Amino acid sequence: MSRHRDIELMAAGWDRRFEADVSRVNELVEMYTEMGYEVTTSEIVPDDFGPDCAGCAIAASCNRYVVIYTRTPIAKVAENAN
């Protein structure tokens, strides 16, 4: 994912929630889905890290994380507008 992708998702109504370890993604997607949200994920790429992370010894393991995004389903937004 790049910052450009992040901007596109947010422009489409997605809220960036947090970064999660891939081992927990299915659990988190299920949780947000049960709460009524649409859920999508995106891989973290080096562009997502700031300059402070460049020298971090554990930065190489950060590829084990994904970004979780949620949004209220469009039908629910329309329903609440009426």
Image (cartoon, rainbow, N blue to C red):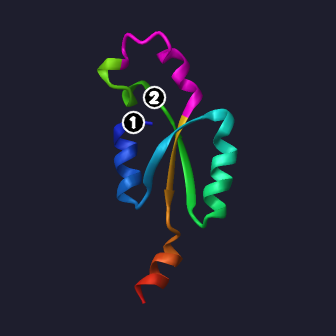
* Residue found at the very far bottom of the displayed protein: 82
Residue 63 horizontal side relative to residue 13, left or right:
right
Q: Amino acid at mark 2?
A: Val
Q: CA distance from mark 2 to mark 1?
A: 7 Å
Q: Residues within 10 Å of mark 2 (few under 14, many from 20)?
A: some
Q: Earlier in the sequence, mark 2 or mark 1?
A: 1
Depth order, front residue of 39/57: 57
Q: Which mark is residue 51?
A: none
Give the residue pinned by disc 1: 2
Residue 53 coordinates in the image, percent (x, y): 37, 18
Quadrant of the snapshot with the C terminus: bottom left
Image location of residue 23, percent across then percent down: 68, 34
- Three-letter residue code for mark 1: Ser
Q: Residue visible at 63% across and 51% down? A: 29
Q: Which residue is mark 2?
A: 45
- Give the SS element for disc 1: loop
Query: Would residue 62 be counted in the magenta stretch?
Result: yes
**Above or below, comparing residue 57 to residue 61 in the picture:** above
C-beta proximity under 8 Å, tags 2 and 1: yes
Image quadrant containing the N terminus: top left
Secondary structure, mark 2, is loop
Find residue 70 and report its horizontal and vertical position in percent.
51, 56
Above or below, comparing residue 47 to residue 37 in the picture: above
Residue 5 shown in magenta = no
Instruction: Check the image and report above or below for 55 versus 28.
Output: above
**In which quarter of the view is residue 24 placed?**
top right
- Relative horizontal placement of residue 27, taking residue 73 as reference (left or right): right
Residue at image point 40% right, 44% down? 5
Span highlighted in magenta in the image? 53-65
Q: Residue furthest left?
A: 51
**Which residue appears at 47% of the width and 48% of the height?**
17
